[in-house]
Amino acid sequence: MSFKKHRVTVLGSTGSIGTNTLDVIARHPERFEVFALSAATQTDLMFAQCAQFKPKYAVMVSEPHARRLAEKIKENGLSVQVLWTPEALEMIAAHELVDTVMAAIVGAAGLTSCMAAAKAGKRLLLANKEALVVGGDVFMQAVRAGGAQLLPIDSEHSAIFQSLPEDSTSWAQRVEKIILTASGGPFRTRAPGTLKHVTPDEACAHPNWVMGRKISVDSATMMNKALEVIEAKYLFGLAPQQIEVVIHPQSIIHSMVQYRDASVVAQLGTPDMRVPIAYGLAWPDRIVSGAKALDFSSLANMTFEVPDETRFPGLPLAWEVLKAPLGSTAVLNAANEVAVAAFLNQRIRFDHIHHVNQATLDLVTVSDVNDIEGLLALDTQARAVAGQIAKSLEL
């Protein structure tokens, strides 16, 4: 069977999601070709990706990194065009020759390029939580207005998407609730009183998944699940009270949908991000992802627990900000990014992360924000407030 090759832009190509996306693409050269790549600082890895996939464009965040990459590309006779301006990210996301955009830039920095892809009507594979957490209704309006095809890449949201009816207009009538599973991270059984002594390396040692340091810390605090609750609300159009979180330490069931008749549909698989990536790239087809299949004969017992809010105080903030004025979710996200960065730089303690998040929400006054400029201004304000709070807590 022959396919029209899909041209893919990978935003954040040197991160975990980006490298896994390129792994899947490399397995299907007859279906996909790489149009553009972007990265922050990993010049050597970006060069290796350019040499392998030969994109038309490579975008680096800063001019010095871009110049180093351009020199290596010229020395090796590659025809890749290297760019570094902020507008370049939006250009490769919205380019008329691009069919699919993998949005895997970590944090609010990925919002504007996601918006550009949405407005241009691309197939948008969303691995960047912040586009929805920060953008919310503004982002979803851009998706609808541009006619974009939005497919979630987070393992949990992909699992929900795979477990829902194909006809999205029937979701509200047929679905009772969605259940996001969480591994519980490395501190699921650790005494809450000892969490103040956690080191960055301990927080990044996830028991099941291989992820970047920021998202690993979010998993350890379960703030990643709080952000996923917010994301799920906008992705699937359900009320916040229809979203539940359950701890499932084995990470075999990736999430579930409970229907009105009390039946539950779940998606299972090995904890390998190539599965939801392959699903998004080829949807509605199924293609080889490179992940191992589940071996049911060797599976341990599957267990489930209610999240302990003493150990994970950040999780309830998701429902709090969803009840608050539009833009409150952006404040929570900004505060968390600042707090996690301060922790990873060993400036504040692990348990201070929640303090920074809660205090920032208390101090930043939010009126409903209905445009991207207002959201970005609110993000800037929240970061400044969170930075001052983190500074007051410095070790």
Image: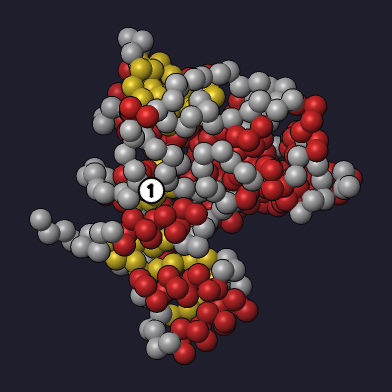
In the figure, 20 relative to 135: above or below?
below
User: Which color scheme did the rendering employ for the protein?
Assistant: secondary structure
Could you tell me residue 112's position as x and y percent?
53, 57
Residue at x 38% of width, y 84% of height: 79
Report the side of 331 relative to 28 (left or right): right
Report the side of 344 relative to 281 (left or right): right
Camera-side residue: 310 or 205? 205
In the figure, 379 relative to 52: above or below?
above
Q: Quadrant of the N terminus?
A: bottom left
Res. 266 in view:
yes
Q: Quadrant of residue 305?
A: top right
Residue at x 36% of width, y 35% of height: 269
How many numbered discs?
A: 1
Res. 238 in view:
no
Q: Amino acid at mark 1?
A: Arg
| SS at circle 1 | helix
- Neighbor class of circle 1 (other Cα within 10 Å; few <14, some 14-19, many 20+) is many
Q: Quadrant of residue 354?
A: top right
Could you tell me residue 62's position as x and y percent?
61, 73
Kindly identify which residue carries mark 1: 274
Could you tell me residue 147's position as x and y percent?
33, 48
